[in-house]
């Protein structure tokens, strides 16, 4: 498949498709149906339960009851986690150590395990995000730099995940977002310009009666945390 081209070639045979692969924010998005069919799977749609069903060619179609059970099990994620995934375009995983905790790109000592670690080091001139939903229900969104960078003045940070998170959790409070984002940039700049040796203090805002805190610690330019 070629970015922007409505065609798929499987074993040398070309076939027209109704949607082309796209490249957005350094990520490639492919039409799942055609990828599955190209790899030898049957694809069907259950409109009642709104479930896509894929199974290998030559094998019987899975029982819908079992498919629904697995879908319900998968969708057992807390609503806050689903919101984060939708807003940030990420997939969070259940922590292996803490029941009820969901994480994205979190790892010890300060970089996640492979293959995410290699990707972060490869793009060490740019910030990356860590997202955490802990057992007490707190949300953490951290704008972080790779720990291998000796001088973070060389790193370009992206604070858009903070605003995306705020929009997902606090609709109707948009008038307050510019002040929050301005403070987030101020905190990030203090950290960056001092090569992390200076940090601004924590700042708390109130959105719909919820405490929303900005801070900077460890390998974070700025962190957002709140309890929905």
Image (spheres, rainbow, N blue to C red):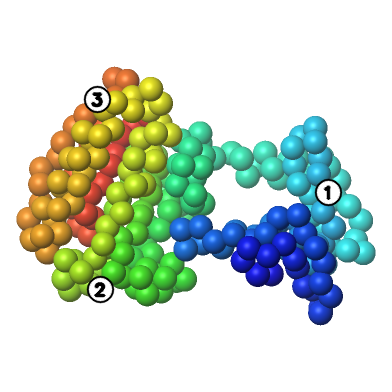
- Left or right position of 70 against 118: right
The answer to which of marks 3 and 1 sits earlier in the sequence is 1
Q: Residue furthest top?
A: 209
**Residue pictured at 15% horizontal, 46% vertical:** 186
Number of labelled discs? 3
Q: Which residue is mark 2?
A: 148
Q: How far apart are the alpha carbons under marks 3 and 2? A: 35 Å
Q: Which residue is mark 3?
A: 206
Q: Which residue is mark 1?
A: 44
Q: Are marks 1 and 2 in contact (CB under 8 Å)?
A: no
Q: Quadrant location of the C terminus?
A: top left
Q: Are marks 3 and 1 in contact (CB under 8 Å)?
A: no
User: Quick one: 55 or 72, which is closer to the camera?
Assistant: 55
Using the rendered view, name the quadrant where residue 65 is placed: top right
Q: Is residue 136 visible?
A: no
Q: Is residue 6 visible?
A: yes
Camera-near label (1 vs 2) is 1
**Residue pictured at 76% horizontal, 46% vertical:** 52
**Residue pictured at 42% horizontal, 70% vertical:** 119
Q: Position of residue 15 (x, y in %)?
A: 82, 67
- Left or right position of 167 against 58: left
Q: Position of residue 108 (x, y in %)?
A: 33, 64
How many residues crowd around disc 3 within 10 Å: few (fewer than 14), some, or many (20 or more)?
Answer: few
For residue 177, which numbered disc appears in the image? none
Q: Position of residue 188 (x, y in %)?
A: 18, 51
């Amino acid at each position: 498949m070629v970015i922007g081209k409505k065609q798929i070639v499987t074993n040398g045979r070309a076939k027209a498709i109704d949607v082309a692969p796209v490249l957005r924010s350094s990520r490639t998005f492919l039409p799942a149906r055609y990828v599955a069919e190209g790899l030898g799977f049957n694809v069907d749609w259950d409109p009642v339960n709104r479930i896509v069903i894929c199974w290998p060619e030559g094998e019987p179609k899975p029982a819908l009851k079992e498919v629904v059970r697995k879908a319900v099990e998968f969708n057992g994620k807390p609503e806050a986690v689903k919101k984060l995934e939708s807003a940030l375009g990420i997939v969070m995983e259940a922590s292996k150590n803490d029941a009820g905790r969901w994480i994205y790109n979190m790892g010890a000592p300060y970089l996640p395990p492979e293959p995410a670690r290699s990707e972060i080091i490869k793009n060490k001139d740019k910030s990356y995000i860590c997202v955490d939903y802990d057992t007490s229900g707190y949300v953490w969104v951290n704008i972080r730099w790779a720990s291998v960078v000796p001088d973070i003045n060389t790193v370009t940070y992206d604070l858009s995940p903070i605003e995306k998170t705020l929009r997902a959790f606090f609709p109707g409070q948009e008038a307050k977002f510019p002040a929050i984002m301005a403070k987030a940039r101020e905190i990030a700049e203090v950290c960056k310009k001092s090569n992390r040796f200076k940090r601004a203090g924590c700042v708390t805002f109130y959105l719909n009666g919820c405490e929303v805190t900005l801070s900077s610690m460890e390998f974070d330019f700025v962190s957002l945390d709140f309890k929905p």
